[in-house]
Amino acid sequence: MNKKKLDYTLFKRLLMYAKPYKKVFVFAAFCVLLLSFLSPLRPYLIGKMVDNYIVNTQNKELLLHWSIGIIGLLFIEGILQFVSSYFSNLLAQSVIRDIRKKLFSHVVSFRMKYFDKTPIGALVTRVVSDLEAITQVFSSGIMEMSRDLISLLVVLSLMFYTNWELSLMTLIPIPLLIFATRIFARAMKSAFQLERKQVTKLNTFVQEHLTGMSIVQLFNKNKEEYSKFVEINNGHRKAHINAVWANSIFFPVVEILSSLSIAFLLVWGALNAGGKTNVEIQAMYGQIIAFTLWIYQLYRPIRQLADKFNVLQRGIVRAERIFEIMDRNDHRQESGKNERVDFRKDISFDKVSFSYTENTDVLKQINLKIDTGKMIAIVGATGSGKSTIVNVLGRFYEHQSGTIKIGEVDIKEIKLAHLRDNIAIVLQDIFLFSDTIHNNITLGDERISREEVIKASKAVGAHDFITQLPNGYDYSIGERGSVLSVGQRQLLAFIRAYVYDPQILILDEATSSVDTESEMLIQEATINLTKGRTSVVIAHRLSTIQKADQIVVMDKGEILEIGTHNELLLKNGKYKTLYEKQIFKPA
Ligand SMILES: Nc1ncnc2c1ncn2[C@@H]1O[C@H](COP(=O)(O)OP(=O)(O)OP(=O)(O)O)[C@@H](O)[C@H]1O
Ligand SMILES: [Mg+2]
């Protein structure tokens, strides 16, 4: 693949996002166009002013007028510069906001399966920093590059129009500049790549070690980890210095080359001055001044064009990665249409099989009936597929064969939002956002009032501990709720489920142990939560199991036994073994 080529289809697709901001785009482009003509015009006018009112006529009044005019022009240029940069950035940021919104809502609609395979870090990079690179396509890419290119043409035309001989003289060092720019661009590219790699390394290390801090301290690994950190940190410094080095050598080279152009200009002046009268020599003043200014206007864009082209290209490559995700429709979870389902009906599993990855069935031909309003407990060894039942019932994963029905309706036909509104699920791993307690309970749903939250937390038995926190319900919990105990986090999840007042409740009990007091609270909360609704509880506590209307015993993806506690004990089967091995936490 030729890397220097731009992918125009991608480019066009990206431009489509600017369509709603056509006015901003046109306005910014207009300012850019104006600027690329005005800036090269200024040296021309200065040259003319010098010729007409200093060298030839010495008309002080007109000279003053012209000076004021040129200062005015400079002023207008300044304003245009500001306006064009403001609007091109406004355009870029608006476009990025739109793409980011679209991307995010697209990604969150993906099946859980997608997230099993895609590292979260990679997605964060897509949604945050890849998009940042696309901003530059619009600001420094399209706008600034057009300005550079147009003004380059205008400067060259004006130069040749004024004096072609002189133009050729001053252009002598340009091939050298182009050559230097190419070398520099290559050096910079590899320096930047190295820099990026090192930054990622450093980020990953710091993030992982802060997250896993307790492990590092627990195993007393501080010293070893510190020396690893020192090494990575050194690499990071080296990569940055590398980039700076390439940068610091390039700019003096450009300075020297532009001075060389000016030197050629003076050489031309000296060569031409031979055998001429003073008046004739004076006639060259205006041109020399104009050319000196043009030389600077010529060097800047040439120096920057290569760089900007890289930025543009990089932005488009990033855009490709983003469009790739946006085009992924096979990962989207298809949603049913039925929005009027009576959830106060029995739930039935009929020969339901499911596998996360091909050819390993985690659920094998599950048949199960859960009567409305009743509570069933699912028990079984770790890895037997209990949480997987929750995953398919909540449609986080789609089962491959068999049917799950609520009453007479296949859950695949139910609109996903409708299903999730009526089934509340308390997961085994409780996730809390770094936000207030209140918002963690309502999950940002403003229809849920503080009164309802308080009522729910009283019902669950969490009101007391919450009011004891510094700001009560407005207490902001740290990342992932790390300041709360395991039991307290569990209670928060219970309140979440309670305020939604679902018809069906699924509770995947946490396996981790909590203190006796929290244990009591959780037991009570479980009773309150399951009261009067169809509930499926994946149980690890004997107290919960004993209260269940039915106990389902699972093993390696199959249902072995179904019955009440006493029935199952009498059966002398798997349940009895589990019970005797004391895998359930005592009541
Ligand atoms: N996202 C996933 N991708 C692939 N395999 C998975 C995934 N989640 C679970 N599994 C596998 O499916 C099997 C059943 O897991 P499941 O989480 O249902 O067990 P469980 O009965 O809930 O266990 P525990 O009591 O430890 O919570 C396990 O072998 C597990 O490794
Ligand atoms: Mg589980």
Image (spheres, rainbow, N blue to C red):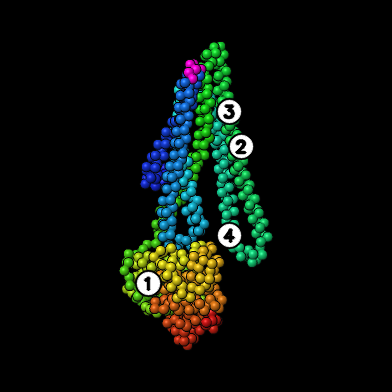
N-term-proximal mark, 2 vs 1: 2
Q: Secondary structure at mark 1?
A: strand
In this rendering, which labeled residue sits more in front, label 2 or label 3? 3
Under mark 2, the amino acid is: Ile
Under mark 1, the amino acid is: Ile
Q: Secondary structure at mark 3?
A: helix
**Residue at label 4?**
208
In this rendering, which labeled residue sits more in front, label 4 or label 1? 4
Give how far apart the Cα atoms at labels 4 and 2 are. Answer: 37 Å
Q: Could you say where residue 269 lies in the image, as x and y percent from the top left?
A: 55, 19
Q: Residue at x 45, y 63 (%)?
A: 113
Most foreground residue, 522 or 16: 522
Give how far apart the Cα atoms at labels 4 and 1 are. Answer: 40 Å
**Residue at label 1?**
404
Q: Which residues are magenta?
A: 55-60
Q: Are marks 4 and 2 in contact (CB under 8 Å)?
A: no
Most foreground residue, 359 or 183: 183
Q: Residues within 10 Å of mark 2 (few under 14, many from 20)?
A: few
Q: Secondary structure at mark 2?
A: helix
Most foreground residue, 224 or 97: 97
N-term-proximal mark, 4 vs 2: 4
Q: Are marks 4 and 3 in contact (CB under 8 Å)?
A: no
Is ligand 1 less than 8 Å from the beta carbon at label 3? no
- Does 328 sit above or below residue 243? below
N-term-proximal mark, 4 vs 3: 4
**Residue at label 3?**
259
N-term-proximal mark, 4 vs 1: 4
Checking the image for residue 249, the label placed there is: 2
N-term-proximal mark, 2 vs 3: 2
- Does 447 sit above or below residue 252? below
